[in-house]
Amino acid sequence: MGGVRFDAAWVACLREWAAGLGFSALGIAEVDLADAEPGLQAWLDAGFHGEMDYMARHGMRRARPAELVPGTVSAVMASVEYAPRDPGWVARAWETLADAERAYVSRYALGRDYHKVLRSRLQRLAERIAGEIGPFGHRVFCDSAPVMEVELARRAGLGWRGKHTLLLNRGQGSVFFLGSLFTDLRLPADAPASEHCGSCTRCLTACPTGAIVAPYRVDARRCISYLTIELKGPIPVELRPAIGNRIYGCDDCQLACPWNRYARPSAMDDFAPRNRLDCATLLEFFAWTEEEFAQRMAGSPILRIGHERWLRNLAVALGNSGGGAEVRRALLARADHPSVLVREHVAWALERQAQMGVQPDAR
């Protein structure tokens, strides 16, 4: 490495290598995040992380990359779009949300597990760098360790933080994944991007559960993504009606964001919809056995919640559907499920159906 000059020209080559691996953008950030610590601590102190105990356990380590990976002085941040190739995907997503019989899965989870896809490509980028300069200290991440990806990506010039707390970019909207490569190479940092949300508050208004409690502040305990993915126990009864037909994650704040009109479709086949995740009915998914779930969700980020929480989420959505006798029969078939969690949500769904005027099957 002694003869290598890490200047703008070298970084331009780095961007070319990244583009060749399918990354849509790459930026470099310094890793001193001391000024981000007070906000992180206030968020934790408010209890907004809910049952995500690892957030509190890691504490300020999340804002101290050099503690996570000793020797780190630069963070190479890269992004990959996952927007569907259908140019009308936003309208189509709203249509699915409006159809109570269909299952809504967050657009990021329709294809392969992004954690594996991005980490693999970042590792290949690191190997390309090593091939040019020799061995160097590094470690790759993608939503897999206490890393402030959005803050680092903001500092690396990949976008600005929207009021929903996600990163926004003029050419990508917010529908892209972030990955990071921590390194001991002192690389020239990029300038942060300017902000372009203005007075818009559509994301706050769109949130079904009011989880965006203020601009740039999300109470995860109310967020549907948290409730359907991270929460291991019962979903709070008072929040179940607002979940609608969302069975894994939620996109409402992104669908409402004007910047996603400019989101580029994903160039990677990895993120194309699989197993009818973009068009199936609730009943179709509710009928899956545990074996079918494991087989169909292999390689999907959805696999991590397991069949039990999959059924929990679907039971809530079926209760909200107001469906007829067929839905009621499907729920009754799961009423004696071995899982207490599933039984409790099925019982709630049957009660909610009754409240909505769905009559028992007379046959």
Image (tube, helix red, strand yellow):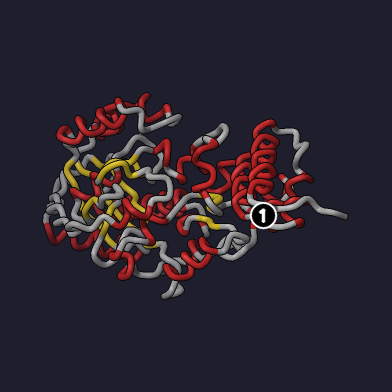
Identify the residue under disc 1: 285
Give the residue drawn at x 25%, y 35%.
Answer: 65
Indicate the amino acid at tag 1.
Phe
| Residue 325 rendering spot, x and y as whole percentages | 76, 56
Q: Quadrant of the C terminus?
A: bottom right
| Residue 56 rendering spot, x and y as whole percentages | 36, 26
What secondary structure is found at the residue carrying circle 1? helix
Q: Is residue 71 left or right of residue 47?
A: left
Give the residue drawn at x 15%, y 52%.
Answer: 192
Instruction: State whether residue 128 is above or below residue 217.
Output: below
Question: Closer to the camera, 188 or 36?
Answer: 36
Instruction: State whether residue 317 is above or below residue 270.
Output: above
Give the residue drawn at x 19%, y 62%.
Answer: 12
| Residue 312 rendering spot, x and y as whole percentages | 62, 41
Q: Is residue 123 left or right of residue 282?
A: left
| Residue 300 rendering spot, x and y as whole percentages | 55, 52
User: Which picture quadrant has residue 184?
Assistant: top left
